[in-house]
Image (spheres, rainbow, N blue to C red):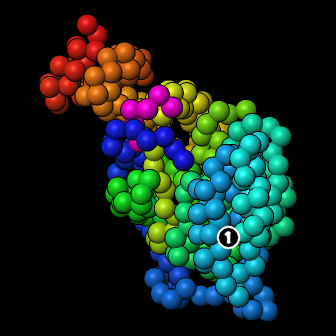
């Protein structure tokens, strides 16, 4: 279970951003002459020829959450689906393997630390025609998988498809609207993914991308899934269905673990952003890329300002001071802008520095 904070719940910093505003490929049945899908009853595979899908679930020492994740996948199963669920264990010392096998799924062992290594074990072992993903502390919703599969079946020019992510707190209370609201209908989503990437649990890919894009970068400490999705977007067209399919359960702010995670993520995020920008440098104007980079700095600086305020409210001067310092290092410009918008923030900042 993710650590609890002080009643203040935080999504991944990038999930607080406004939804992208571009033309949408909606839901589920082909609209003749329009080249996209419209919301309707989802088309189904047949009993004789079901969709063959490998579901990759990386995990470590969270057997109770893992059981919920597996059951959320099994809940959508049906005769139109042939699901291969692979639990990729990254060195658990609890009853993870026993829980997974009790639920009838295959357990694979990752020998290298990190979520990328665990996912790669599953990607390599996948035997389905499609690969989908689920983190062990998130849940699939009933709208997951079939809409993406229907679009991929109708659009052979697409090699991946994303549904919508519903951000919630740990108890499942909604924190905002499902996203992305829309993506480019032509499948060129590189620019959109640079602005804000979907959580990997909403992604379905053709297994063939394993040969063209390769595997997730195990050298990255975080953002491996974003890097992989950007690499897919650089080489393939990606569809979108405006159907919520993933419950993304968020962590609370103002915990040592979450502060440390976001501090590490800032620098990895910059590396992932710029190396993919360089690969796709002919695709987007540099002015837009610079604005996007600056916005990311603001998102992370904003996280540490919110975390610092929560630490200050709890009387934790050292932790609040550390958060202010992190925010200033990431973007002093955004800290100044935040104070200009709300001068009362300066009070807790000065308190933390005394």
Residue 76 shown in magenta: no
Residue 106 falls in image quadrant: bottom right
On the picture, is 267 further left or further right than 5? right
Q: What residue appears at the point 72 percent right and 53 percent down from the top-left corner?
A: 96
Residue 55 falls in image quadrant: bottom right
Can you say whether 254 is above or below 163 in the image?
above
Residue 185 seen in render? no
Residue 163 position, x and y percent, is 53, 66
Residue 190 position, x and y percent, is 56, 51
Residue 274 position, x and y percent, is 58, 32
Q: What residue appears at the point 25 percent right and 7 percent down from the top-left corner?
A: 354
> Which residue bears the numbered disc 1?
157
Q: Magenta stretch?
A: 252-257
Residue 75 position, x and y percent, is 60, 76
Can you say whether 143 is above or below 117 in the image?
below
Number of other residues with Cα within 10 Å of mark 1, as a class: few under 14, some 14 to 19, many 20 or more:
some
């Amino acid at each position: 279970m993710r650590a609890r904070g002080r009643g203040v719940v935080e999504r991944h910093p990038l999930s607080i951003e406004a939804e992208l505003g571009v033309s949408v490929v909606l839901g589920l049945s082909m609209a003749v002459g329009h080249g996209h899908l419209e919301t309707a009853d989802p088309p189904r595979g047949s009993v004789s020829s079901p969709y063959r899908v490998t579901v990759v679930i990386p995990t470590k020492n969270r057997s109770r959450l893992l059981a919920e994740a597996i059951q959320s996948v099994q809940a959508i199963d049906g005769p139109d689906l042939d699901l291969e669920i692979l639990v990729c264990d990254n060195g658990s010392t609890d009853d993870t393997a026993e829980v997974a096998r009790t639920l009838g799924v295959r357990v694979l062992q990752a020998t290298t630390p990190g979520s990328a290594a665990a996912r790669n074990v599953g990607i390599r072992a996948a035997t389905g025609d499609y690969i989908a993903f689920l983190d062990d502390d998130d849940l699939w919703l009933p709208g997951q998988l079939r809409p993406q599969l229907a679009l991929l079946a109708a659009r052979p020019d697409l090699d991946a498809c994303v549904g919508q992510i519903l951000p919630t707190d740990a108890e499942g209370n909604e924190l905002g609207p499902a996203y992305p609201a829309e993506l480019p209908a032509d499948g060129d989503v590189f620019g959109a993914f640079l602005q804000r990437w979907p959580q990997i649990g909403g992604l379905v890919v053709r297994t063939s991308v394993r040969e063209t894009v390769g595997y997730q970068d195990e050298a990255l400490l975080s953002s491996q899934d974003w890097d992989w999705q950007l690499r897919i977007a650089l080489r393939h067209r990606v569809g979108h269905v405006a159907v919520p399919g993933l419950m993304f359960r968020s962590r609370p702010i103002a915990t040592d673990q979450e502060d440390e995670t976001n501090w590490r993520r800032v620098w990895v995020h910059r590396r992932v952003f710029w190396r993919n920008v360089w690969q796709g440098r002919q695709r987007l104007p540099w002015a837009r890329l610079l604005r996007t980079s600056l916005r990311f700095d603001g998102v992370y600086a904003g996280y540490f300002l919110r975390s610092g305020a929560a630490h200050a409210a709890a009387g934790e001067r050292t932790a609040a001071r550390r958060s202010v310092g992190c925010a200033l290092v990431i973007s002093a410009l955004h800290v100044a802008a935040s104070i200009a918008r709300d001068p009362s923030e300066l009070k807790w900042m000065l308190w933390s520095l005394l």
